[in-house]
DNA sequence: ATGACTGCAAACCGTTTGCATACTG
DNA sequence: CAGTATGCAAACGGTTTGCAGTCAT
């Protein structure tokens, strides 16, 4: 059984074609799409699916820890099915959003906890610049 | 002459009471206020100032590098008159946003450039958790 | 004096909500 | 069969825009 099916059932949520479709887009699209991109990508195969359903599905996935939400400052959220904490780089020219492998050795969480006295439970790290193709 | 006055004039922008007032709020309020908070804080002394003016002033300040914009995922932006790159911690209970001193020794920018081949020009680092008062 | 700035109101756009219908379990 | 999920349309809230009148230089 697919991971997502298992998690939905275990938590009392119904498994629907729409939820599987939305999750599938995130699993296979590495571009960190926003809601509108997900919606558009699904239109051909699911012409009756509504934007509201995409929003509601993502809300459930967030609750269940199946996706993480990114705010790169565009005015809309993007989504990532990779829920391990990892930094992102955003190209200011072409708008591409790439992942960066997380390095535990930097121990950022410990650093933040020591400096602030907070109990840290999550993090988001964004780098802004120009990708190799747009650098010139 | 005040720093802000100098920078506005040098770049051909007019120095207005509204712009000085908005900037002054950011200089003295360490809470990283959103537009609405700035607007409300100014109401007593500047009862005719409009929200649009606050937005337009901040737009100018961003362009001139006088403030930085934060996206902690609330659906509205916050502003910080400290434009040096530095991480922020957000308390998930009381909503407080604190600064963290930036540590050059971690060399995050170099790390990101080496890993990705991007030319990095900016960064935003957010930690989420519970502040000392809300930890329990 | 003139060109930029302000303040109002309307427009915008991403997201949320309410509700009748459809479908999962 | 019961109750949740979908899909539509309307509502919402932060932000942007257009424009007439005002103010900084």
Image (tube, coloured by chain):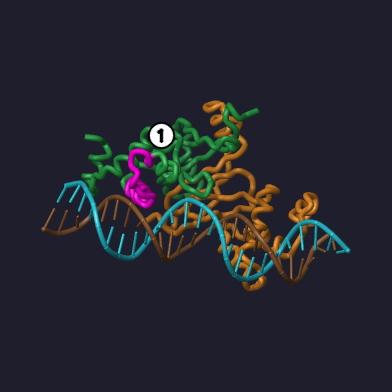
Chain colours: A green, B orange, C cyan, D brown
| Residue A68 percent location from the top left of the image | 40, 43
Identify the subunit bearing mark 1.
Answer: A
The residue singled out by tag 1 in the image is A29
> Could you tell whether D4 is left or right of B118 in the image?
left
Q: Main secondary structure of the magenta part?
A: helix
Q: Nearer the viewer, residue A89 or B111?
A: A89
Q: Residue at x 53, y 28 (%)?
A: B116
- Compare residues B12 and B31 and report the one nearer the observer: B12
Q: Quadrant of the C terminus of chain B?
A: bottom left
The residue located at (45%, 54%) in the rendering is B91
Name the side, left or right, on which A87 lies relative to D4.
right
Quick check: A26 above or below A117? above
Q: Is residue A75 visible?
A: yes
The residue lying toward the viewer, choosing from B95 and B47, is B47
Is residue A43 magenta-colored?
yes
* Secondary structure of residue under mark 1: loop
Q: Residue at x 52, y 35 (%)?
A: A96
Image: magenta residue range: A42-63
């Amino acid at each position: 059984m697919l991971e997502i099916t298992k998690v939905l059932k275990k938590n009392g949520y119904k498994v629907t074609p729409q939820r599987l479709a939305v999750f599938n887009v995130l699993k296979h699209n590495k571009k960190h799409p926003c809601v509108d991109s997900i919606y558009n990508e699904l239109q051909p195969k699911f012409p009756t699916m509504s934007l509201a359903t995409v929003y509601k599905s993502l809300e459930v996935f967030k609750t269940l820890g199946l996706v993480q939400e990114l705010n790169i400052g565009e005015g809309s959220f993007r989504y990532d099915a990779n829920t391990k904490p990892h930094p992102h780089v955003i190209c200011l020219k072409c708008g591409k959003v790439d992942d960066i492998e997380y390095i535990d050795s930097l121990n950022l969480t410990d650093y933040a906890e020591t400096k602030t006295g907070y109990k840290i439970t999550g993090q988001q790290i964004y780098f802004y610049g120009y990708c190799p193709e747009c650098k010139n």
